[in-house]
Amino acid sequence: MKLENIQKDLKNILSGKRFHHSEGVARTAFHLAEKYGANPDKAFLAGWVHDCAKEFSLQEMQQIACENHLSADSILLSSRALLHGPVGSILAEEKYGIHDEEIKSAIYYHTTGHADMSLLEKIIFLADYIEPSRDFPGVEKLRQLAEKDLDRALLAAYDSTIAHLLDQGAYIYDLTFIGRNDLILKLKEKTNEKK
Ligand code: DGI
Ligand code: FE
Ligand code: FE
C-alpha cells in the first residue's frame, strides 16, 4: 500500500493525538536514521505505522494475534501496552503490505526492545520516546543526548521507563530488562575498548 493510503487508514483508526504522535515519530526517526546511518525511508514508514494497533481493544488484539499464530506468552497476551507492538507488526504486513523484516521487527519491539537491537529498532524505540509532542520531565535532556549518542540515549529512555513502571507498581516484562541489561554490557565493552 502507498504511504498516502496508509496515512489515510491511520487517520481513520487512530485518535487525532495518536495520529499526530505517529507523524512525530516518523519525522524524528527519519532524522535519527540520517544521523546514524540507517535507511531514512524505512525509519519514516516504521514511525508512521508503529502504533497502528494501539487503539484496538485487548480482545481485538488477541484475535489478530491468534488468527496469525503469534507466538506469545500469557503476559504479552494480557496487556494492551505490551501487545500493540507485536500485533502492529502483523497488521503492517497483512493490512499495509509491508514485508520488510527490519521494519516489521522495529514495530514489533518498539515498546520493550530486546537484546542485540538493530539500528532501526533502536531508532524507532527512541523516536517514540522523544518525538516533539512528548512532554515529560527530562524529555529535553533525552533529545539532546539522542543527538550525541544513540545507545546512551536509549539507555536513558529504558531507565526512565523502568523507573516509571516501578513507581506505578507495574509488571516489568522480561524483554524490557533484557534489552536494558544487554545495552549496559555493550556500553561497558565500548568503554573498555577505548581504554
Ligand atoms: O504506544 P506509546 O504510548 O507511544 O509508547 P510505548 O509503545 O513505548 O509504550 C506503551 C506503554 O507500555 C507505556 O505506558 C509504557 C508501557 N510499558 C513499556 N514497557 C513495559 C510497559 N508496561 C509493562 N507493564 N511492562 C513493561 O515492561
Ligand atoms: Fe507504542
Ligand atoms: Fe508510540
Image (cartoon, grey):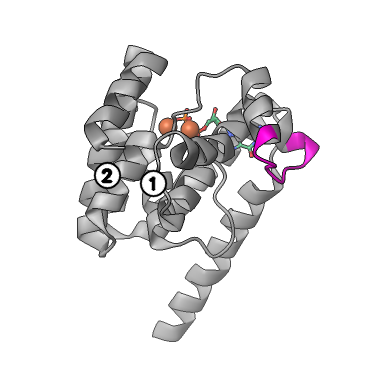
Position of 34 relative to 169 (above/below) = below
Query: Where is mark 1, residue-wise?
Result: 124
Question: What secondary structure prevails in the magenta region?
Answer: loop
Location of ligand 1 given as a quarter of the image: top right
Q: Is residue 65 magenta?
A: no
- Residue ID at (36%, 51%): 123
Q: Counting other residues with Cα less than 10 Å from the Cα at mark 1, is it few (<14), some (14-19), or many (20 or more)? A: many
Q: Counting other residues with Cα less than 10 Å from the Cα at mark 2, is it few (<14), some (14-19), or many (20 or more)? A: many
- Residue ID at (41%, 54%): 100
Query: Where is mark 2, residue-wise?
Result: 44
- Residue ID at (45%, 76%): 190
Q: Which residues are magenta?
A: 67-75
Q: Amino acid at mark 2?
A: Phe
Q: Secondary structure at mark 1?
A: helix
Q: Is residue 68 magenta?
A: yes
Q: Position of residue 162 (x, y in %)?
A: 59, 40
Position of 7 relative to 161 (above/below) = above
The N terminus: image quadrant: top left
